[in-house]
Image (spheres, helix red, strand yellow):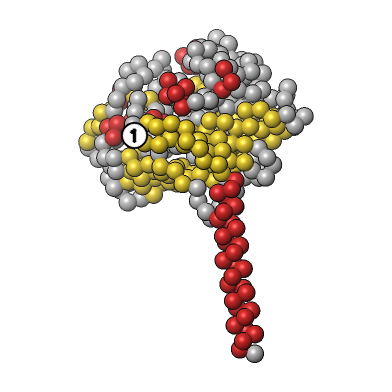
Amino acid sequence: MKKVLLFSLTVIIVSVLLSSCNQSSKNKEMVKKENFGVHKGKDVFLFTLKNKAGNVLKLTNFGARVTWIEVPDRAGNKENITFGYDTFEGMIKGDPYFGSVVGRYANRIAKGKFTLDGVEYSLPINNGANSLHGGPEGWHSVVWDAEVPSDSDFPTVKFTYKSPDMEAGYPGNMNVEATYTWNDNNEIVINYKCTTDKNTVINITNHAYFNLHGAGNGDILDHQVVINADRFVPVDSGLIPTGELRPVAGTPFDFTKPHTVGERINEKDEQLILGGGYDHTFILNSPRTVDASVYDAVSGRYMEVISDQPGVQFYTGNFLDGTQTGHGGKKYIYRSGLCLETGHYPDSPNQQDFPSTTLKAGETFTSQTIYRFSVK
Ligand code: GAL
């Protein structure tokens, strides 16, 4: 009897071990890692993630970027719908933000100054009079560490970076994680986690550009957009918030019902003129629901954005001018890509009435954003 019990126990243990082994090798099999380049002495890799639907997401640890999202159209034709470069050299010379994780503070901080606990901090000025996206050497421009976790059911890559105290002017040693999972529902699930040893500020996002016709295939003016936001954040000529939170009702900023990007973008609206198009944060009505969506009636591709963050920067590629040549030699022309960058509002450290972006020493910041792809 004892022997039988011992035997069954051994069988159970061995099968559990075997299945966990299968599990761990499963994620590794679903993620291919290749050398992509070397930057400042650190290896840069290209990770190719394939989900059960056979769709491909490519990531790199340079800026913890998304560089390729290949999803089918209504007829099943697959095409890459995000901006990026075929080579690391192209990436280094190209636009710094395509697909990157942006931090320590995504978006603008007025005049590159903010005060925390009575101390004034100065940040690099890299956008007119202001500091943009963590300065020129923000997290988009550094090589992150990367691992392929063994305990994931779906293709997953976890990027980590240790941002030293006073890097780009921000206080506190910050450990940051950005984990991408490409699940079988064609969702890119991005989980962020940040900790600090001194009080600091944090606003982290992903800066992917999307064109659902396929990246480099014309503009996005016919894309139908919905943003579940009753208010947005008006800006001044430097794209710094005025402090007002303005209702969208009756303005070209009302995307609570579907509108194409191009329908009202050239109206003589003060905010559209200041932004050169849409380049504004929308205040999400109920984060964690479908906060925004984009539909391309031509291809049938549909993208939904779900986030736990209070806002989303809707940017319509107004600074693109065709000088960037991306994947397959395609040119990224004016308004040929749109971004939906989830996060806090710009310049929050200087705006008392905005939700706080302070992260206290010893506390942990987490957030999640999902980009879900399907067809209609
Ligand atoms: C966006 C920002 C734009 C522009 C762009 C980078 O996040 O809203 O104004 O700076 O990044 O080119």
Q: Is residue 272 left or right of residue 5?
A: left
For the residue marked with disc 1, what is the amino acid? Gly
Q: How many marks?
A: 1
| Residue 69 on image: x %, y % | 60, 32
Residue 354 lies left or right of residue 11; in this view the side is left
Q: Quadrant of residue 221?
A: top right
Whole-percent x, y for residue 373 in the image: 65, 35
* Residue farthest along the right direction in this orientation: 75
Between residue 3 and residue 166, name the one nearer to us: 3
Left or right placement of residue 264 versus residue 103 in this view: right
**In percent of the image, x 61 and y 62: which residue is there?**
19
Residue 57 visible in the current orientation: yes
User: Label 1, on which residue?
Assistant: 41
**149 vs 289: above or below:** below
Among the 4 quarters of the image, the one containing residue 338: top right
Which image quarter is the N terminus in? bottom right
Give the residue at x 46% y 46%.
Answer: 147
Picture quadrant of residue 353: top left
Q: Residue at x 39, y 17 (%)?
A: 238
Q: Quadrant of the C terminus?
A: top right
Q: Is residue 346 left or right of residue 292?
A: left
Q: Front-most of 321 and 158?
A: 158
Residue occupying image coordinates x 53% and y 30%: 67
**236 over 163 or under it: above or below:** above
Q: Outermost residue toward the front?
A: 35
Quick one: 326 or 241, which is closer to the camera? Answer: 326
Give residue 30's position: percent from left, percent from top. 59, 46
The picture places residue 264, in percent across and down from the top left corner, at 61, 15
Name of the residue lying farthest toward the left: 119
Mark 1 is surrounded, within 10 Å at the Cα level, by few (under 14), some (14 to 19) or many (20 or more) other residues, namely few
